[in-house]
């Protein structure tokens, strides 16, 4: 099968997965105890029976579940995710305002984790028994074991009072005035600590994985051949070994995306980052089901897109897959 | 090939030592693994840390009789300032941190363990069926697995906990329901490898039923990597529970380490200890568990030891 056929198949599969997510969440939320109409009425400070009936009619809650599901799915396809019970605003607008900060955070964290992690792992692999290797092992266990929200809070203590280099709250300075370039720098300045916090857990995993993978690859015949040709150690490491060692790291990077989003949820809460995590938290507390469904949908969408990109990247990085057709 | 002592000892003798080495006395693989584990210093450190934490949780309240909800001294008293009332200081309401630490560990550990059991249970069942039967069973179950991997776990768990009352049981079930795919994949890979081996064909040729082959023949031989993964799963589940309680979605009637951090974080810059100490407790617990997991991994895969 050609590359485009493969991509199309993956795309179609992603769409089916997303529809499945929507259906599952919809059924789950509507199967739960508690009446959404009462929640809405509660937000309004109580309501008479007539008002309750009107609320049910307004939000389509009086129709059979299967009809509601059909209407909802039809809405999703046309980009209409319904109206938030709490914010009284279309869900798509609520999410639209918050999805960019979340993507920014997640991508920045992933970049920090991969570059630092792979760098540490490669250095460690050159001397598997050396001190640096031991440090990487210890560090990766520590990074994995520290709860991400706690790491964030510890960094806030450090940077709020002792070392005020980076802002510890929000995404932009209050009353910011300046051009778009200064604004971007301001956002990056605010992004540093949240992204570092989220990156640290994954950094640890990449360091460990790339160390093991590099040790494997450095023992391979083609690396010995490269050395025998008299290539410099740097060339052997980066041109011959790393390109092969990076494949398992890409696979894991794709799988980790869902976990990154979960972590972002906590990190956003800690640093008051105005992303989807806060929105999810608020809508959970208020039982704002349309918003919650919307957040779940977009979170799943982000994972599906990330997996698709990983897949494509993998095919670019490994020519064996590119020419080998539909091998998994 | 790793053979595990849990295999029923129907074969008359232990397999002869591999021809490659000099004749040594045959040691059972389990005992050999235990020996390797006991020589692994980080793993022993992990075991010691975990033992100390468990002992403190078990017996600590005999020495420090305090209610974690009771106000014992002025709010935000620093550690060691009032050793008779609040050795490790008080939180924003004046409650004893030490009492909170000693009682708040239980929900965290219990939920972690229960969730890990559930995770491993579901994961092994799905992975075993998938890897053993292959074909449409495999296709179907792997699609379900991928489906669950697309849902960001914490978000989905948040929804489950909110929808179905935040009790310890709900939290454990929610964590279990969202975390099993990785175990399932690992189990499946092991089953795919093992089902092609001769002793499985042997079991089949004497007419063993599928259920017997799955649970008595293949599963015991797939256990070593699964034990390692189960150990690490406990750590992940503890972090999960801590995250949910930190967000305030835990059991509201139970003191827990994550809840302490969540409740005190607003006063972080005035008082560091009510946030730092419970986090340190979570960190040490998970750290110890992952050291043990790594030690088990080395013990079960001797060829990785040189790394």
Image (cartoon, rainbow, N blue to C red):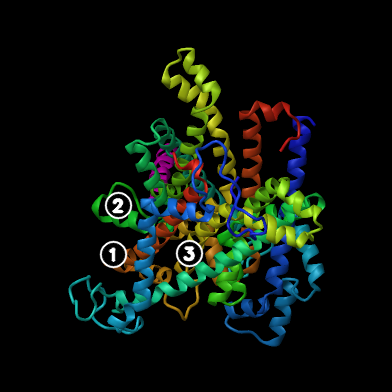
**Which residue in the structure is indicated by mark 2?**
A159
Determine which of the numbered discs, if any, sits on residue A165 in the image. none
Left or right of B154? Residue A316 is right
In the rendered structure, does residue A188 fall within the stretch colored magenta? yes
Q: Nearer the viewer, residue B106 or A1?
A: B106
Q: Can see residue A87?
A: no
Spatial CA distance of label 3 from label 2 is: 27 Å
Q: Can see residue A91?
A: yes
The residue segment tinted magenta is A173-191
**Residue under the image location 24 percent in, 53 percent down:** A162
**Which residue in the structure is indicated by mark 1?**
B272
**Residue under the image location 51 percent in, 26 percent down:** A241
Please tell me in which quadrant of the rendered image residue A317 appears.
Answer: top right
**Which residue in the structure is indicated by mark 3?**
B238
Residue B55, percent from left and from top: 36, 72
Badge 3 or badge 1: first in the primary sequence? 3
Q: Residues within 10 Å of mark 3 (few under 14, many from 20)?
A: many
Q: Nearer the viewer, residue B198 or B245?
A: B198
**Quadrant the C terminus of chain B occupies:** top left
Spatial CA distance of label 3 from label 1 is: 22 Å
């Amino acid at each position: 099968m050609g590359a485009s056929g493969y991509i199309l198949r993956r795309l179609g599969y992603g769409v089916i997965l997303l529809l499945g997510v929507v259906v599952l969440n919809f059924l789950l939320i509507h199967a739960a105890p508690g009446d959404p109409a009462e929640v809405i009425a509660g937000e309004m400070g109580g309501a008479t029976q007539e008002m309750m009936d009107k609320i049910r009619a307004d939000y389509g809650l009086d129709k059979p579940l299967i009809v509601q599901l059909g209407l909802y799915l039809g809405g999703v396809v046309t980009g209409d995710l319904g109206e938030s019970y709490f914010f009284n605003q279309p869900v798509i607008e609520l999410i639209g305002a918050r999805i960019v900060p979340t993507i920014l955070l997640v991508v920045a964290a992933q970049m920090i984790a991969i570059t630092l992690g792979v760098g540490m792992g490669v250095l460690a692999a050159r001397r598997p028994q050396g001190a640096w290797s031991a440090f990487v092992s210890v560090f990766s266990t520590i990074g994995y074991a520290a709860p991400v929200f706690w790491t964030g809070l510890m960094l806030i203590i450090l940077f709020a009072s002792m070392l005020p280099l980076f802002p510890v709250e929000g995404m932009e300075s209050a009353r910011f005035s300046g051009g778009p370039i200064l604004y971007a720098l301001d956002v990056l300045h605010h992004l540093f600590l949240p992204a570092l916090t989220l990156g640290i857990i994954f950094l640890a995993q990449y360091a460990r994985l790339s160390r093991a993978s590099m040790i494997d690859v450095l023992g391979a015949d083609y690396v010995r051949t490269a050395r025998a040709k008299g290539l410099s150690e740097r060339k052997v490491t980066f041109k011959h070994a790393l390109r092969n060692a990076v494949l398992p790291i890409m696979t894991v990077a794709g799988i980790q995306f869902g976990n990154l989003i979960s972590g972002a949820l906590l990190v956003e809460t800690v640093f008051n980052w105005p992303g989807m995590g806060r929105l999810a938290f608020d809508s959970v507390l208020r039982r704002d089901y349309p918003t919650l469904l919307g957040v779940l949908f977009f979170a799943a969408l982000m994972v599906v897109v990330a997996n698709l990109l990983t897949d494509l990247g993998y095919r670019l990085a490994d020519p064996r897959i590119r020419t080998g057709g539909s091998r998994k | 090939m790793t053979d595990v002592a849990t295999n029923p000892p129907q074969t008359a003798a232990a397999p002869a030592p591999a021809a490659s080495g000099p004749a040594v006395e045959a040691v059972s693989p389990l005992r050999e693994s235990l020996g390797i584990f006991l020589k692994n210093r980080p793993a022993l450190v992990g075991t010691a840390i975990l033992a100390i934490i468990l002992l403190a949780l078990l017996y600590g309240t005999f020495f420090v009789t305090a209610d974690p909800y009771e106000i014992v001294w002025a709010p935000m008293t620093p550690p060691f300032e009032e050793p008779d009332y609040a050795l490790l200081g008080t939180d924003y309401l004046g409650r004893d941190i030490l009492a909170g630490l000693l009682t708040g560990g239980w929900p965290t550990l219990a939920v972690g363990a229960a969730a890990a059991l559930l995770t491993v249970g579901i994961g092994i069942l799905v992975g075993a069926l998938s890897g053993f039967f292959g074909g449409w069973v495999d296709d179907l179950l792997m699609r379900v697995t991928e489906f669950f991997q697309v849902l960001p776990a914490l978000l989905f768990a948040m929804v489950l906990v909110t929808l179905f009352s935040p009790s310890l049981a709900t939290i454990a079930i929610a964590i279990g329901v969202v975390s099993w795919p990785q175990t399932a994949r690992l189990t499946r890979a092991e089953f795919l490898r093992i089902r092609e081996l001769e002793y499985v064909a042997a079991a089949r040729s004497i007419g063993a039923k599928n259920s017997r082959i799955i649970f008595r023949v293949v599963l015991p031989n797939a256990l070593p990597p699964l034990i390692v993964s189960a150990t690490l799963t406990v750590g992940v589940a503890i972090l999960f529970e801590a995250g949910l309680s930190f967000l305030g979605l835990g059991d509201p009637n139970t003191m827990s380490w994550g809840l302490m951090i969540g409740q005190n974080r607003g006063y972080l810059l005035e008082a560091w200890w009510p946030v730092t100490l419970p986090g340190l407790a979570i960190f040490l617990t998970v750290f110890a568990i992952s050291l043990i997991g790594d030690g088990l991994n080395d013990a079960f895969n001797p060829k990785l030891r040189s790394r």
